[in-house]
Image (cartoon, helix red, strand yellow):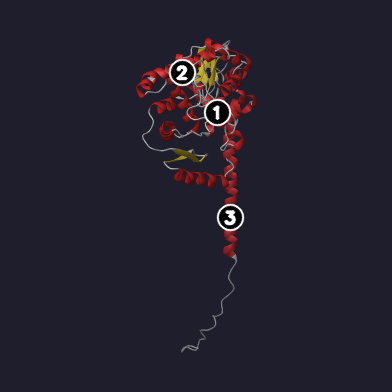
Amino acid sequence: MSSTGIDLTEPAHQPPRSKRGFGCLAALFALAVVVVGLYLVVTKGIEYLDAKFNPPADYAGEGRGSVTVEIVAGDTATDIAATLVDKDVVASLEAFTDAAADDPDSTSIQPGVYKMRKKMSAAAALGLLIGNSNRVEVLVSIPEGLSTEEITAAITRQTDISAQAVRAVLDRPDSLDLPPYARGQQEGYLFPASYPIGPGTTARQLLAMMTDRFAQAAKDIDLVARAEEAGVNPHDVVTVASLIEAEASRPEDLGKVARVIYNREEAGIALQLDSTVHYIAGSKGKVFTTDEQRAIDSPYNTYLYPGLPPGAIGAPGEAALSAALDPTPGRWLYFVTVNPDTGKTLFARTLTGHNANVNKLEDFCLSSDTC
């Protein structure tokens, strides 16, 4: 009790709270739902009417004149549309992408150079691209590091040239303009690049483009003169470059891998590169080699035979060729890629340090499906 006689331990009597406030909130919420619903209906209706009565800009008819358009591997419908708009083949990006979305065959458009017309309707332009009849050139893409067998498969996959025709040319190296130091070997001298070829291009003509492109790259980096200056045979430079291409995936590691190869050669230590074993075993893409694979008797097996293999194991690009000519200074004798997903590679001077790095790879493989 307080001095006023009011018991402060119990609340004073309160009148029942009115439910009117809750009713107002419910009504406002319902009204908001109705307003939002009306807004969506009106918006969708406006979009429908706009699409119906204001379609994207589009030319009419089959167009006129002539223009070439290049479609590259990996282009989406939007990428293709942007190229067509830039060449004034179609009037708008939206018109072409709408036409492509309505035609499931639009996903069959192949890379290449197409002969088109200016100011075509989006549907007419799409029809020419889908039919392939107006494709005047095919772009044959050869990535770095592929072996001749893999290059053969890439050619047959991207062109009408048969694997048999490619192998027939490869069996006659004298039909290609190989450099004298190639020793009659095509492996390593079919340069990785994109090659535009027209209808009727033969296997010999395409492979000749590739050896010519190698000659150009060799000239650009002054391969022969720099190899002689370093006291290295140009053929060995190409071989080392192919090993670099197979073993390193990051630009910053190319010169270091080259240095390890040269350091081990000078020290009389077998290279012991898994890439050479994968090459002879046909197991490229695997992280590890098996005891059985490492026992294969082949001059390309750098576990069994010291020094460089007798030739390249794949097609090196210009960066790998340059690294083979200008290795990074260092005393490393070992390297291992500890994260095959990112290409992270660690280098060591001693076997103890190398084994510690190998443990990191093994730890990675315990938690990854890559291995």
* Mark 3 vs mark 2, CA separation in Å: 73 Å
Residue 172 in view (yes/no): yes
**Residue 166, percent from left and from top:** 59, 15
**Residue 99, percent from left and from top:** 60, 25
Q: Residues within 10 Å of mark 1 (few under 14, many from 20)?
A: some
* Mark 1 vs mark 2, CA separation in Å: 31 Å
Q: Residues within 10 Å of mark 3 (few under 14, many from 20)?
A: few
**Residue 81, percent from left and from top:** 53, 25
- Residue on which disc 2 sits: 214
Please tell me which of labels 3 and 2 falls first in the chain.
3
Side (left or right) of 363 relative to 232: right
Q: Amino acid at mark 3?
A: Phe
Query: Can you say whether 107 is above or below 260 in the image?
Result: above
Q: Quadrant of the C terminus?
A: top right
Task: From the viewer's side, name the closer residue of 114 and 353.
Answer: 353
Task: From the viewer's side, name the closer residue of 235 and 9.
Answer: 235
Q: Secondary structure at mark 3?
A: helix
- Residue on which disc 3 sits: 29
Q: Amino acid at mark 1?
A: Thr
Q: Amino acid at mark 2?
A: Phe
